[in-house]
Amino acid sequence: MKEPLLCVDNLTTRFTTSSGTVLAVDRVSFSISRGEVLGIVGESGSGKSQIFMSIAGLLPPNGQVSGEARFLGRNLIGADESELNRIRGRALAFVFQDPMTALHPFRTIASQLTEMLRLHRGLDHGAARAEALRLLDRVHIPDAKRRLDMYPHELSGGMRQRVMIAMSISCNPRLLIADEPTTALDVTVQLQVLDLLDELRRDEGIAIALITHDMGVVSRLSDRVIVIYAGNIVEEGTTEEVLLSPTHPYTQGLLASMPDLYRPLSALSPIPGYPPDGRQARKGCMFAPRCSRAQNVCRDVFPELTARTGRQRQACHFPISGSQGLAS
Ligand SMILES: Nc1ncnc2c1ncn2[C@@H]1O[C@H](COP(=O)(O)OP(=O)(O)O)[C@@H](O)[C@H]1O
Ligand code: SF4
Ligand SMILES: [Mg+2]
């Protein structure tokens, strides 16, 4: 069998802080195949972003990571900085929530895109400008020639996100890590950006790790989903399985509580309580204090991620069956 594009095994990330050690990612294992979109969902602070910051070697100095993350056959955990630099921005590219933090405010789109193309692809000035124009066209920026010479603040949020996507695909990535790529955008613009990502996956075979707190975003683009709670994967399956028949009480709670592209705010029913503090000692199921199905065993024994039927896996001693998700 062919090796997946990204294969993560037992990834664990800790941060040392003055008030104790934060366990942000706890023994996480998953894979992403070529051209596949994997949705990574969970509440804010659950560890979604740190999984990918760890994989890409982008942790701050107080972060320590263990485990393996094989990308294109090479383990990135512990790889030296020069190797990571060769991979980041090329085979492995990021799209973040707020393009304004990634784009330089006082430089035109052309100068930022061409610099990248000259640096990473060795194009001369003329060729880089032509390629920059092609990339803006590729991400469907209307009137691209005129927009090339604009500054980021002269573009709408949606257009800026398209520029960000143009930059991230400029070196033909194999995996795009899209971290809340549409969270800052209006709903109609969100849909357009998701359609663009879908097109890139379809036409260019780019795999996407789609990090989001929004189940509507996941349902539109992902093939498979992993659900993260307190740094653990608590459920994994195809998008259809996880969204239509969630088996973990947390997934079901998320579906009932998250505002998304389809659910009116009035229909929300929040999960009671709060996620645990990452510094807390771990025993049993981390969701137990918030779970209506919790029993004594849940508080004592850590529920391993297992498949009871089919391929859908859940980390729960008393999984739900036949429940309703997004279809409700
Ligand atoms: N530099 C840091 N120092 C200490 N804790 C951190 C640091 N960065 C992230 N964390 C903690 O790691 C956990 C996971 O964060 P993150 O992956 O950013 O969550 P999200 O699911 O919202 O993307 C959070 O509890 C966060 O407070
Ligand atoms: S293991 Fe127990 S506490 Fe945890 S989610 Fe399942 S039923 Fe709830
Ligand atoms: Mg995040």
Image (cartoon, rainbow, N blue to C red):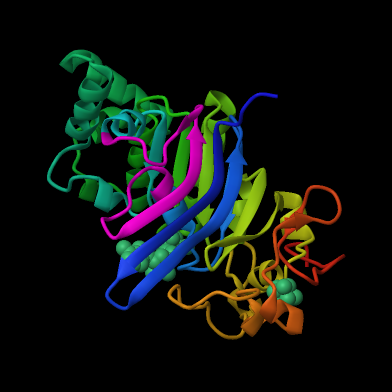
Residue that appears at 18% across and 14% down: 124
Q: Quadrant of the N terminus?
A: top right
Residue 115 in the image: state x and y as whole percent: 19, 28
Q: Does residue 142 appear anywhere in the picture? A: no
Residue that appears at 22% across and 50% down: 153
Magenta stretch: includes residue 211: no
Q: Does residue 69 appear anywhere in the picture? A: yes
Q: Quadrant of residue 50?
A: bottom left
Residue 225 in the image: state x and y as whole percent: 64, 51
Per the rendered image, the range of residues in magenta is 54-81
In terms of depth relative to the viewer, which is nearer, 20 or 172?
A: 20
Residue 177 in the image: state x and y as whole percent: 45, 43
Tell me if residue 89 comes above or below residue 312 in the rendering: above
Residue that appears at 62% across and 27% down: 3
Tell me if residue 221 comes above or below residue 246 in the rendering: above
Residue that appears at 23% across and 15% down: 123
Q: Is residue 181 left or right of residue 296?
A: left
Magenta stretch: includes residue 60: yes
Residue 72 in the image: state x and y as whole percent: 50, 27
Q: Is residue 75 left or right of residue 325?
A: left
Tell me if residue 237 comes above or below residue 257 in the rendering: above
Q: Quadrant of residue 292?
A: bottom right
In terms of depth relative to the viewer, which is nearer, 248 or 323?
A: 248
Q: Quadrant of residue 291?
A: bottom right
